[in-house]
């Protein structure tokens, strides 16, 4: 969940004029985290669609996992990995809240109206769709149940083992973006959200080498939902018809560090200054993590981790942020600088 200090209502208090400017024409932007979004993005990475070089460790692990025990994705795979440039938007519905569960996401998927399923399939596959798409269009409710079951299995096998650390990166991204929004409104928020997104003249615009021409992002009557993604494409992905809301899915900050944090020996200078245990903890915190995550990764007790974190915080090397019921720890600029000195 997003920290209460950075909910949309709180943003109005921090920067009301900028906030209402962003809200014009479609309601205020909000942040959301979706396990289903990560699952769908992960499957596309396995299908080599817009492979993100920062995530190569995960596809390699997932491919080995599936080689040992394959998944039945006969209903889902043809929708996500095909020769078409797009895929059906109903596979990742806009989450109702800031942080939904996989059960919430899949329930929303199965509530997609039959008419919307058919419209989406026709938009992507045209008048000559492959057989699995034809079957889904003929029996949408039955097909959505099958797809939901396959995506649940894919989530449990491929995303759930890493979800705690993935969620920490997503939460840290949301906290950072919400602070930017509070400090400077939409202009500040979109200044570095993604190189292809720009906020000008009260409008969100999409442009860059990947796109033929710059266009205005239609926020829709339900507003704009911003969704960071860890296991996904390096590009921004905008879906206009995930209900009445437009979703903007973008690469979360610190994705690369997620898969490498704690895999390298700590810097010699950090070991000499802090001792090996705290230096290893600082190395592991190149990617945000909870006390439980760190204890599991380093093979020490949560109480020992807490003691080391207290010293690192008092030294200005580590900061913490509350996110819902969890507390995230991450390195400060000083901690990053010390940890990077070999």
Image (tube, rainbow, N blue to C red):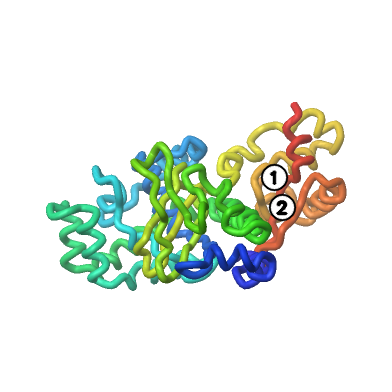
> Is 113 displayed left or right of 194 in the figure?
left
At mark 1, the secondary structure is loop
Q: Nearer the viewer, residue 109 or 8?
A: 8
Question: Which residue occupies the extreme left position in the image?
Answer: 128
**Proximity of marks 1 and 2: CB atoms separated by less than 8 Å:** yes
Q: Residues within 10 Å of mark 2 (few under 14, many from 20)?
A: many
**Image quarter hosting the N terminus:** bottom right
Instruction: Decide: is 49 above or below 119.
Output: above
For the point 41% across and 54% down, the residue is 216
Measured in 3D between alpha carbons, the distance from the residue under mark 1 to the one under mark 2, in whole angstroms, is 7 Å
> Is 229 displayed left or right of 326 in the figure?
left
What percent of the width, then of the height, locates residue 80?
Answer: 31, 50
Question: Which residue occupies the extreme front position in the image?
Answer: 201
Which residue corresponds to mark 2?
Answer: 329
For the point 60% across and 51% down, the residue is 169
Residue 43 visible in the snapshot: yes
Q: Nearer the viewer, residue 330 or 73?
A: 330
Instruction: Decide: is 67 above or below 319.
Output: above
> Is 308 displayed left or right of 211 in the figure?
right
Q: How many marks?
A: 2
Q: Nearer the viewer, residue 207 or 294?
A: 207
Which residue corresponds to mark 1?
Answer: 285
What percent of the width, then of the height, locates residue 234?
Answer: 46, 42
For the point 24% across and 43% down, the residue is 83
Corner quadrant of residue 64: top left
């Amino acid at each position: 969940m997003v920290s209460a200090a950075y909910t949309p209502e709180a943003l109005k208090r921090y920067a009301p004029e900028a906030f209402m400017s962003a809200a014009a024409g479609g309601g205020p932007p909000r942040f959301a985290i979706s396990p289903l979004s990560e699952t769908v993005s992960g499957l596309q990475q396995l299908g080599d669609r817009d492979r993100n070089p920062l995530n190569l460790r995960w596809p390699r692990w997932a491919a080995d996992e599936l080689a040992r025990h394959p998944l039945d994705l006969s209903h889902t795979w043809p929708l996500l990995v095909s020769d078409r440039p797009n895929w059906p938007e109903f596979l990742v519905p806009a989450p109702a809240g800031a942080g939904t569960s996989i059960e919430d996401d899949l329930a929303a998927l199965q509530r997609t109206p039959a008419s919307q399923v058919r419209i989406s399939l026709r938009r992507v596959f045209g008048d000559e769709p492959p057989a699995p798409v034809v079957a889904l269009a003929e029996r949408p409710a039955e097909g959505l149940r099958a797809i939901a079951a396959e995506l649940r299995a894919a989530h449990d096998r491929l995303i759930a083992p890493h979800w705690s650390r993935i969620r920490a990166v997503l939460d840290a991204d949301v906290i950072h973006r919400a602070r930017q929004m509070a400090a400077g409104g939409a202009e500040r928020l979109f200044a570095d959200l993604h190189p292809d997104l720009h906020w000008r003249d009260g409008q969100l615009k999409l442009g860059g080498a990947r796109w033929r021409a710059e266009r205005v992002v239609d926020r829709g009557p339900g507003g704009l939902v911003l969704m960071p993604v860890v296991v996904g494409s390096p590009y921004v992905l905008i879906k206009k018809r995930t209900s009445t809301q437009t979703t903007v899915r973008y690469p979360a900050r610190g994705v690369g560090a997620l898969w490498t944090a704690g895999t390298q020996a700590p810097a010699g200078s950090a070991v000499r200054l802090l001792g090996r245990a705290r230096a290893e903890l600082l190395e592991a915190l190149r990617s945000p993590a909870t006390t439980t995550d760190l204890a599991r990764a380093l093979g020490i007790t949560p109480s020992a981790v807490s003691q080391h974190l207290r010293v690192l915080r008092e030294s200005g090397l580590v900061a913490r942020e509350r996110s819902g019921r969890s507390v995230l720890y991450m390195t400060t600029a000083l901690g990053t600088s010390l940890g990077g000195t070999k």
